[in-house]
Image: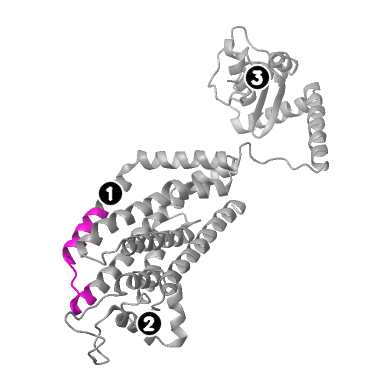
Amino acid sequence: MSKQGRTIIFSIHQPRYSIFKLFDSLTLLASGRLMFHGPAQEALGYFASAGHHCEPYNNPADFFLDVINGDSSAVVLNREDEDGEAKKTEEPLKRDKPLIEKLAEFYVNSNFFTETKVELNRLSGVQTKKKSTGFKESTYATSFCHQLRWISKRSFKNLLGNPQASIAQIIITVVLGLVIGAIFYGLKNDPTGIQNRAGVLFFLTTNQCFSSVSSVELFVVEKKLFMHEYISGYYRVSSYFFGKLLSDLLPMRMLPSIIFTCIIYFLLGLKPTVEAFFTMMFTLMMVAYSASSMALAIAAGQSVVSIATLLMTITFVFMMIFSGLLVNLRTIVPWLSWLQYLSIPRYGYAALQHNEFLGQNFCPGLNVTANSTCSFAICTGEEFLMNQGIDLSPWGLWRNHVALASMIVIFLTIAYLKLLFLNKYS
């Protein structure tokens, strides 16, 4: 692999002499000071010139460590020659510090240091020349697409390697869909059908929001790993961000929405058209994506999952008030009514109502065109939608999806910027 041009980095603990003979260059550090840097085979002669001789049959690697740590018998013998006797009772801190300084000064005055200094100055001049020519060096060794592919592959493998969360979410989705289908089974076109339809559509919207709270772990759990790998230059922030979205967020939000729609739609007996079926599925997916995007925007940069989860829960509870079921949005005072436009459930709930109620008749046997009804009676889906303040035109449906798509873009941009500045100021 090395002959093919790859750089191999590995560690050897206590190398024996046969391995040490293979070393070309040797660098010795102690207490942050440089003790030696030069050809490995000349190190023994260098330390001998400094007064530290390697004993016969002693491993050079162990000898060098003993010398710079002040534990070698050569160091002790050298002190005996200089002082006449070994001060074995001297404290290690007081004993080692002068030795480290002595070895560091000896290296600075050696030919090895001079040669290293010349080489460093030459390399520094080459780098300065490259920068002055106007060519920008690439920070990363691989392209964005290469990094995106491997990050997505790793995230997907982690998802498959820990199937408890994903399988549990799918099982819960199936069970919950069957339970909701049993409770609201066979919705009728009568006044009770209005209440039941409004209730189940509200539940579907809020369920998509609260089930997306689990996405807060996407960046919080791997925060330290991400910071380490990014600072080390493994990949760009954008590669990591989009890789996690493609491999984790998109499939884990799309699959439950598809399963949920396929189970409850036919059990409930909702509007029997293909267009209404796929519109409902698309709406639930958009709600899940927008809620997950908001979770990422809140959780990015957080170190504790519980704090991000608490913030998400409080935000969704506040949004539920302005969804359109608990309070009629037309009756809210003007200085608070603008808050409804910040509510994710409001857009999802309005789209589902528009998709289901439009064209429905809830007064069987009554010709609403020939018979006049009182202003308080609701017999058609159009009357219900108008009472809720929902536009009956096709734009009244799709503007909710446009709003959700805009919120997805805004929240994902916030999450990306938080990740970017998190590494910049860490």
The stretch of residues the image draws in magenta is 173-196
Does residue 413 appear left or right of residue 55 in this picture? left
| Residue nearer the viewer, 353 or 325 | 353
Q: Which residue is mark 1?
A: 168
Distance, label 3 to label 2, CA atoms, is 90 Å
Q: Give the label, 3 or 2, closer to the camera.
A: 2
The structure residue drawn at horizontal position 79% and vertical position 41%, both measured from the top left corner, is: 131
The structure residue drawn at horizontal position 72% and vertical position 14%, both measured from the top left corner, is: 42
Numbered mark located on residue 361 in the image: none
Q: Is residue 186 magenta?
A: yes
Q: Position of residue 211 (x, y in %)?
A: 33, 59
Dot 3 lies on which element? helix
The amino acid pointed to by label 2 is Gly
The structure residue drawn at horizontal position 30% and vertical position 83%, both measured from the top left corner, is: 383
Distance, label 3 to label 1, CA atoms, is 65 Å
Q: Is residue 98 above or below residue 255?
A: above
Q: Is residue 82 magenta?
A: no
**Circle count:** 3
Distance, label 2 to label 1, CA atoms, is 39 Å
Q: Is residue 172 above or below residue 41?
A: below
Q: Position of residue 46 (x, y in %)?
A: 73, 17
Q: Which residue is mark 3?
A: 75
On the rendered image, what quadrant is the N terminus found in? Answer: top right
Q: Characterize the local packing of mark 1: few (<14), some (14-19) or many (20 or more) Cα atoms within 10 angstroms.
A: few
Q: Which residue is mark 2?
A: 389
The amino acid pointed to by label 1 is Ala
Res 132 quadrant in image: top right
Please tell me which of labels 3 and 1 falls first in the chain: 3
Q: Position of residue 205 (x, y in %)?
A: 33, 66
The amino acid pointed to by label 3 is Val
| Residue nearer the viewer, 17 or 57 | 17
